[in-house]
Image: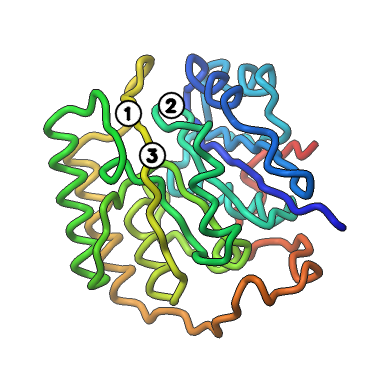
Amino acid sequence: MKKRKLVVFLPAHNEERNIGQVIERIPREMGRNWTVEVLVIDDGSADGTVEEALRAGADHVVSFKENRGLGAAVREGLAGCVRLGADIGLMIDADNEYPAEEIPEVIAPIREGRADYTMGSRFKGTIRGMKLHRRLGNICFTMLQAILLRRMIWDGQSGMRGFSREAMDCADIIHDYNYAQVLTLNLVRQGFVMEEVPITYQVRVHGQSFIKFRKYVGNVLPAIWREMRRPAAERERVPRAAVPQAAYAATPAGSAPQGESKQRYG
């Protein structure tokens, strides 16, 4: 039986003090019919992020020449997973806040055919160390997504998400600054099934978040507006269990940036 592949990808900008710990925590055993590979998207880091990632066991690295933004890095991560032939992709932040050892639980709904897109939910699980203003910001942006999609969402800003092959192929991130809200709106509006999985969360020890309130709001709200204004893509639902393995051959992702990054696959 041909093995299936999980690719765990980490968008990273100046995370040399954290990224190695995240990679070392990633489970490499998912069952005898699965392989696991780690892909790092280096978003123009000026420190030793790439060196630390490779030292910790990263299998593939894509390096942007300059910082392009988290949305651009996640877009390239999804495209990289497709190029590497992933059956499932899992994104996790490189700041060591999210529980890499809980990756099997986060992708379980996709493996079992219940969902196309999963989010590790901090607010359904355990949160340690998050400041009040961060909690309030997360709640407000999550409520906005819930209202727009007319469904319950617990944690719309999670930095740990799983994707089926079809979801990675179809995902369209409309801006480079961030991805969290527009990606969920985009996939759910296309008809992909989303499920949230409780996780444990611990605020980072080293470094600091790139998020600054005014800049975040000034970039995210217009992007949400643009996403909701455009028609949702039409797609025909095919149960994942009924899709033959041959359908998962690696193909280039049309939205992947060209000529702007240095790639090392393998």
Name which of mark 1 and mark 2 comes first in the sequence. Answer: 2
Between the C-alphas of marks 2 and 3, the distance is 16 Å
Between the C-alphas of marks 3 and 1, the distance is 20 Å
Is disc 1 surrounded by few (<14), some (14 to 19) or many (20+) residues within 10 Å? few
Between the C-alphas of marks 1 and 2, the distance is 9 Å
Q: Which mark is residue 95?
A: 2
**Where is residue 17 shown, x and y percent of the image?**
48, 14
Residue on which disc 1 sits: 209
* Tag 1 and tag 2, C-beta contact below 8 Å: yes
Q: How is the image coloured?
A: rainbow
What's the amino acid at mark 2?
Asp
Q: Disc count in the image?
A: 3
Q: Which mark is residue 7?
A: none
Name which of mark 2 and mark 3 comes first in the sequence. Answer: 2
**Where is residue 200 shown, x and y percent of the image?**
36, 33
Q: Residue at x 74, y 47 (%)?
A: 34
Assign the N terminus to one quadrant of the image: bottom right
What's the amino acid at mark 3?
Ile
**Where is residue 231 shown, x and y percent of the image?**
37, 81
Nearest to the observer: residue 112 or residue 100: 112
Is disc 3 surrounded by few (<14), some (14 to 19) or many (20+) residues within 10 Å? many
Q: Residue at x 50, y 45 (%)?
A: 105
65 horizontally vs 147: left or right:
right
232 horizontally vs 165: left or right:
left
Residue on which disc 3 sits: 199
Assign the C terminus to one quadrant of the image: top right
Q: Is residue 224 above or below residue 33?
A: below
Under circle 3, the secondary element is strand
Name which of mark 3 and mark 1 comes first in the sequence. Answer: 3
Question: Disc 3 or disc 1, which is closer to the eye?
Answer: 3
